[in-house]
Amino acid sequence: MPKLIPFNGIVPKIGKVEKVVSKPYDKYSLKEVTEIVVSNEESFLNIIQPELGKGKKNTPFTKENLNKSRGKFETFLATGTLEKKLKKGFYIYRQIKPDFIYTGIIANISADDYRNGNIKIHEQTLAPKEEKLKEYLKTVAINAEPVMFTYPHQAVIDNLVNRLVGNEKYADFEKDGKQHQMWVVEQEDDVNAIIAAFEKIEKVYVADGHHRSASSVLLAEELNKKETGPWSNFMGIFFPDHNLQLFEFNRLIKDTNNLSAEQIISALGEDFLVEQISKNTYKPLILHEISMYVAGKWYSLKLKHDRKNDQLTDKLDANILSKNILSPILGIHDLRNDKRIDFISGLYGPEALKEKVDSNQFAIAFGLFPVSFEQFFAFSDQGKMMPPKTTWFEPKLLNGLVMYDLEIK
């Protein structure tokens, strides 16, 4: 069973939280990042891109620039923008949206739990990206965005968290239309209670952050050949399954592989019941239904009963789409590398698919029914890998709210 490990978190000082935290770097344009670091010297983005505030362009991925990021982090500590908590503990994070409340526990977990199977994954990683992130961690030496884990919810953990969020908040602020709250848990009895509660959990599942977790494990393996240290653990946030939302990842295709809409519909008829939908927008209502938008019209595609398969991988709608449509009809065989395909979260709804096609950015769009948590757990438990961009988990987290120093010298 995996073990949650308390740690000395590094957090923005009280009164500075809103100035420090940021969305992940890749969620901004370069123009936005530059404006933020120039106007707010305490933004966490100054650690990620320390040269932008000096009027320099986006800095390349080099050892020299990574050392500058580490130096900026240490400056934030020295000047009191950040502080390291003296007691080892956990952190409870809550994000409040109008339609949902997410609550999770920020804790460390051992790289050993990844290797021994206590941490389950559902998506393959790319070795070059793992290696790049490992080198980043080796030099900058901080975890600033926790890996997102989930687990089948347990009443004892839910009740414990509900009690702890009755304590005084460390942070409570609004950003990007969402309310963000955090509690520091450092009383010994409370820390031990969380550890004991998670001892009843057989395994945890990576929801978001496969490359971050894999690169942390690679780093631990490399450095542990000499000695063990703080780098043997990495930071995660642990959400029960009922405190997460799981959305579909929809597909956008740049061209129709030289086929007319009529030819595509005719080819689909072999495996699907095809029905034109007279609505402005449409999304699948049941498992094994796929929506398609092409040439200004919506279609419902329902897999024929004699084409259904009981194999776990063949029950996944993303695989059905690839096997029966993208590959044989549209000529897209490699989702990871084909430049003709793009992906968009179902969070944005079918309206986003329609807009992308109507604006001629793409020629055809496919909407999927969301993966269920039952499917998600089954794939992970059986060691099956989902295609890339199959699941979109909410919430999306902020950088710089809680950090973990790997203390690599």
Image: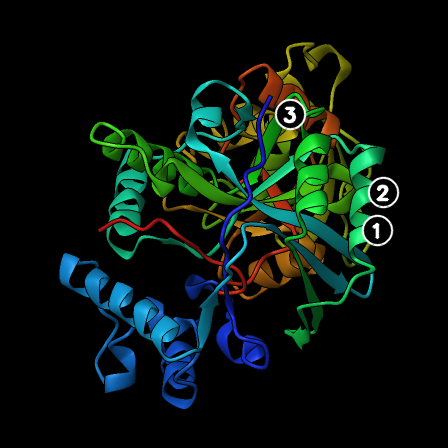
The answer to whether the residue labelled 2 contacts the one labelled 1, judged by CB atoms less than 8 Å apart, is: yes
Q: Which residue is mark 1?
A: 163
What amino acid is labelled 1 in the image? Arg
Badge 3 vs badge 1, beta-carbon distance below 8 Å: no
Can you see residue 368? no
- Which residue lies under the disc numbered 3? 316
Give how far apart the Cα atoms at labels 3 and 2 are. 34 Å
- The residue nearer to you, when weighing 353 against 263, is 353
| Secondary element at tag 3 | loop
User: Is residue 237 found left or right of 133 in the rendered image?
Assistant: right
Q: Is residue 162 above or below residue 213?
A: below
Compared across the picture, whether 350 is left or right of 107 comes to: right
User: Mark 2 = which residue?
Assistant: 159
Q: Nearer the viewer, mark 3 or mark 1?
A: 1
Give the class, few, some or many, for how many residues have Cα within 10 Å of label 1's Cα (few <14, many ≥20): few
Please tell me which residue lies in front, 78 or 404.
78
Can you see residue 117? yes
- The x and y percentages for residue 66 are 22, 61
**x and y percentages locating residue 156 in the rendered image:** 82, 34
